[in-house]
């Protein structure tokens, strides 16, 4: 989220390359630090016999979400560029591109904030396992 905020605030036609590189480093460091633990926690919530299914589902959802997010971001980039050109018709190509990228990062930052808020309501894997063991025991009793 911090990397997204840096991009949303700092991107302009005059932003030096080193600032963009540093913002990307912060962004991808944060992505790495979030992705692996969240996938681990997601799989830990499943019984061991469903690990393969859970991994396949997460990989599929990751691909679908990545494709959808890219399509939405490109659409917003184009909308941001179009809006900027209508406001500033004599703008340079670099200014138009920077305005579109900034517009797309507003959306990505909003998604990051919503995701952060949702993360506070995720059950711990130990709580989920305890609930699933109770459900398995109750269905085993019914089947007998």
Image: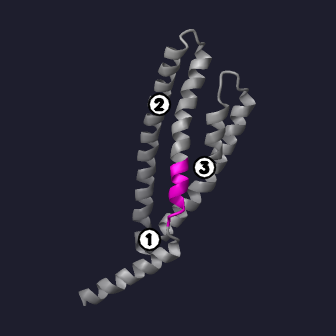
Q: Position of residue 142 (x, y in %)?
A: 25, 87
Q: Where is residue 87 in the image (x, y as percent from the top left)?
A: 52, 16
Indicate the quadrant where residue 139 lies: bottom left
From the viewer's perspective, is residue 72 above or below residue 39? above
Magenta span:
113-122
Say if mark 3 contacts mark 1, CB within 8 Å: no
Report which residue position mark 1 lands on: 46
Closer-to-camera residue (33/13): 13
Closer-to-camera residue (96/63): 96
Report which residue position mark 2 lands on: 76
Q: What element carries label 3?
A: helix
| Quadrant of the image containing the C terminus | bottom left
Q: Which residue is drawn at 46% across and 25% down?
A: 79
Residue, far top: 90
Q: What element carries label 2?
A: helix
Q: What element carries label 1?
A: loop
**Horizontal side of residue 11 vs 63, given as left or right:** right
Q: Position of residue 62 (x, y in %)?
A: 46, 50
Mark 1 or mark 2, whichever is nearer to me? 2
Crowd band around label 1 with a 10 angstrom C-alpha radius: few (<14), some (14–19), many (20+): some
Residue 117 drawn in magenta:
yes
Residue, far left: 143
Say if mark 3 contacts mark 2, CB within 8 Å: no
Report which residue position mark 3 lands on: 31
Q: Earlier in the sequence, mark 3 or mark 1?
A: 3
Say if mark 1 contacts mark 2, CB within 8 Å: no
Q: Which of marks 1 and 2 is nearer the N terminus?
A: 1
Image mark count? 3
Closer-to-camera residue (107/28): 107
The secondary structure that dominates the magenta segment is: helix
């Amino acid at each position: 989220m911090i990397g997204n905020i840096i991009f949303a605030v700092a991107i302009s036609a005059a932003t030096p390359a080193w600032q963009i590189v540093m913002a990307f480093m912060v962004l991808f460091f944060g992505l790495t630090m979030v992705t692996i633990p969240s996938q681990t926690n997601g799989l830990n919530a499943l019984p061991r016999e469903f690990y393969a299914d859970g991994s396949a589902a997460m990989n599929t959802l990751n691909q679908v979400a990545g494709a959808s997010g890219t399509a939405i971001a490109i659409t917003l980039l184009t909308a941001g560029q179009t809006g900027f050109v209508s406001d500033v018709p004599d703008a340079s190509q670099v200014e138009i591109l920077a305005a579109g990228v900034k517009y797309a990062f507003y959306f990505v930052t909003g998604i990051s904030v919503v995701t952060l808020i949702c993360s506070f309501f995720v059950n711990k894997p130990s709580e989920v396992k305890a609930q699933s063991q109770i459900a398995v025991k109750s269905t085993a009793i019914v089947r007998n």
